[in-house]
Amino acid sequence: LAGAPLPELIDALFKIVDPKRIFYGGDWPFTPLEACKALAGKLGASLSTDDPSRGAFIRGNATRLFPTNCGERQLARVR
């Protein structure tokens, strides 16, 4: 996923794809970091809170796949 897709599109995606296989990408560095943060926030706000696993693609799935790149030290460089 990238940007801030409509809730209907997210619902359709989760009907055909396991949430553990979805990642959020913000097109950084081509999209400014602040814009990426804002788009990720919009995306997070549009998610259903009924299923907590749906939010795993914001950070959890990437952390599981790339554990050495998702530590606090690495995140601090882009905050």
Image (cartoon, rainbow, N blue to C red):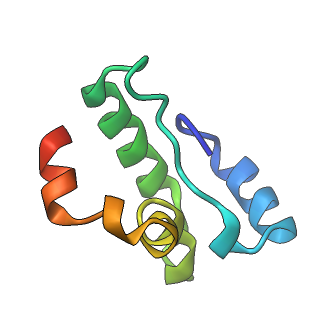
- Percent x, y of residue 20: 64, 74
42 relative to 32, above or below: below
Does the rendering let one see residue 79? no
Report the residue at 34% width, 59% height from top.
69
Q: Residue furthest front?
A: 68
Q: Total marks drawn?
A: 0
Which quarter of the rendering shows the C terminus? top left
Comparing 62 with 57, the one in front is 62
- Percent x, y of residue 74: 21, 53
- Percent x, y of residue 21: 69, 67
The reply, left or right, for residue 33 in relation to residue 23 is left
3 relative to 18, above or below: above
53 relative to 40, above or below: below
Report the residue at 41% width, 36% height from top.
39
The reply, left or right, for residue 33 in relation to residue 64 is left
Does the rendering let one see residue 22? yes
11 relative to 54, above or below: above
- Percent x, y of residue 36: 37, 33
Report the residue at 23% width, 66% height from top.
71
The reply, left or right, for residue 77 in relation to residue 45 is left
Report the residue at 74% width, 48% height from top.
9
The reply, left or right, for residue 16 in relation to residue 66 is right
Q: Quadrant of residue 30?
A: top left
